Amino acid sequence: MAAHRTRDPFGRLDDGDHDRYALQWLATAVYLTGAEAALRP
């Protein structure tokens, strides 16, 4: 999951991986574009 964030030894959330989040967002957009094109008559 792109928004999955780990915790430091004190239980605080880390900053997360912004590049991974952006890559997952882009992959989803490409997938949806392909799905929409396949569903068009």
Image: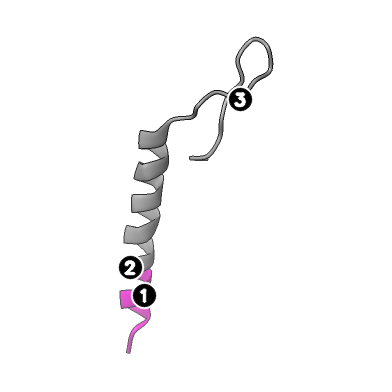
- Viewer-closest of 8 and 4: 8
Q: Which residue is drawn at 37% across and 80% down?
A: 39
Residue type marked 1: Glu
Helix, strand or loop at mark 1: helix
Viewer-closest of 25 and 41:
25
Question: What residue is disc 1 on?
Answer: 36
**Which region is colored magenta?**
33-41
Q: Are the residues flagged by discs 2 and 3 in contact, CB closer than 8 Å?
A: no
Question: Mark 1 or 3, which is nearer the eye?
Answer: 3
> Which amino acid type corresponds to the residue marked 2 in the rendered image?
Thr
Decide which of tag 2 and tag 3 comes sooner along the chain: 3
How packed is label 3: few (under 14 Cα within 10 Å), some, or many (20 or more)? few
Q: Are marks 1 and 3 in contact (CB under 8 Å)?
A: no
Placement of the C terminus among the 4 image quadrants: bottom left
Q: Residue 33 carries which label?
A: 2
The residue at the point 35 percent across, 51 percent down is: 27
